[in-house]
Image (spheres, rainbow, N blue to C red):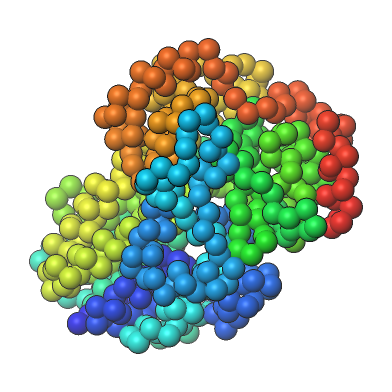
Amino acid sequence: MAHVVIIGAGPVGLVTSILLAADGHRATVLDRDPTAARTVEAAIGGDWRRPGVKQFGHTHILMPAGYRLLDKELPGAVDRIREAGGYTYSMLSGAWKVPGADPGQAGDERFETITARRPVLEAALFATAAETPGVRILGGTKVVSLFVGEARTSGRPHIAGVVTDSGARIEADLVVDASGRRTDVPELLAQVGGAPEVIREEAGFRYYTRYFRADERGVPAPRTWPLTHHNSISVITAPGDGDTWSTTLVTSDRDQELRPLSRVDVWNRVLALYPHAAHWNEGVPLTDVHVMGGTHNTLRCLVAGEQPAVTGILAIGDARMTTNPQFGMGMTTGLRHAVRLRDALRLLGTDDAVELALHVDRGIDAESGPGWADDTAWARHRTAEIDAEMRGERYATDDPAWALRTAVEAVFLKDPEILRAWGDVGSMLATADAAFVETGLVERVIQLGAEAPRYPEPGPDRAELLTAVRDGEPGPHRGRLLVATRDGE
């Protein structure tokens, strides 16, 4: 059996270590952040910080597809999340008001997932990995270089292990980069002549997140879908573990006029302008505004043409491909990569390093590449749309995929079949082609969406938004806002 060094002790790295150890491999997990305080109790109490993971304090929700995979592969970890306060939640729980939807239909359970804040979910996975025979976790350990061993027939560098900041030299049959969107492994590979091809979308988004705990009013009623788009802003809401939740406002990274959303008073005023989301501010604030920018879509390819650029190392999760965090695809995508890697080692082992590299990389491209491309195209359109709104213009494009996507957003509450197809795509249970094109729903979407507004959810226009940002009146929900802020600010 192999010794696998995994760089990164986030959800993807931890799940990978557990899956490989269950197959008899030895897994050494290295993480730059300390691990001594990574307990479920600390995570529930909000005392755990992850300086190496900038999205750690932002809204997370494990998509139903990821939940199904985790429940199948690691049911004990799911039990641990439940014990920490995670509970079953349907992504469509706020949308069953569609006439004739009949939410009790057979198969509707596929839209269910388990709720948990990112720290709690990660702590549960960490505890599971830490007690798994064959897994060793070294926190506060940064990989500073890779060393090359004997080439494995490709004529390219073969990575035989890592060197840490303490000077330790750790040999490995395989190195796995699961260190996330901020990975520095490509730079380390460049030092040994094995740099991957990197494709990076320049436009990105900025996230402004707050966490809350329920007061006497309880947990907010769910919205029709956790993510809604509006003029210049998107709003994300998600339940957490126990009686906690988070709310995020998303802007373009280029939108300088909305940077004051980093202030609690501005954030509160702006959220109050969205009637269907304003009640997600009605609780006891647990945090100020967490801000994250620079969330570009990035693709890192370790295979060029018919040969790997390097062997002995594989990248999975956000270290392989990063997507737009608004849609919550990253964790599920990474878990799929972990299972694919486990299955490849079952099939091929580590002796033929070239075949292993090609098999895993091509499999990831086939399974996750189309979703990455679709998400990247969407992000390009959305940032261009916000650019137009900043100029006071309406965005126009001839791209039929964008037209279909916005039409579905406008009409999914008008038809129970479209609702479920929307839920399948948003839950990562089906592709858009499978849910809409192959089922013949596209014509119905076009018919229903012919006169639909771009933004079906109520909210301010750009001028009203900027007025609120610049200390204007908070609008019709002012009384509700004052109650929410008086308790915690």
- Residue 157 lies, in percent from the top left, at 22, 66
Residue drawn at point x = 20 percent, y = 61 percent: 357
Name the image quarter holding the C terminus.
Answer: bottom right
Q: Is residue 11 visible?
A: yes
Residue drawn at point x = 29 percent, y = 63 percent: 339
- Residue 474 lies, in percent from the top left, at 84, 34
Q: Quadrant of residue 378?
A: top left
- Residue 204 lies, in percent from the top left, at 53, 40
Q: Quadrant of residue 275?
A: top right
**Above or below, comparing residue 101 to residue 147 in the picture:** above
- Residue 430 lies, in percent from the top left, at 33, 42
Q: Between residues 340 and 312, which one lies in front from this camera angle?
A: 340
Q: Between residues 355 and 326, which one lies in front from this camera angle?
A: 326
Number of callouts: 0
Residue drawn at point x = 42 percent, y = 21 percent: 445
Q: Between residues 412 and 265, which one lies in front from this camera angle?
A: 412
Q: Quadrant of residue 356?
A: bottom left
Q: Is residue 192 visible?
A: no
**Above or below, comparing residue 283 to residue 270 in the picture:** below
Name the image quarter holding the N terminus.
Answer: bottom left
Residue drawn at point x = 83 percent, y = 49 percent: 484
Q: Between residues 313 and 397, which one lies in front from this camera angle?
A: 397
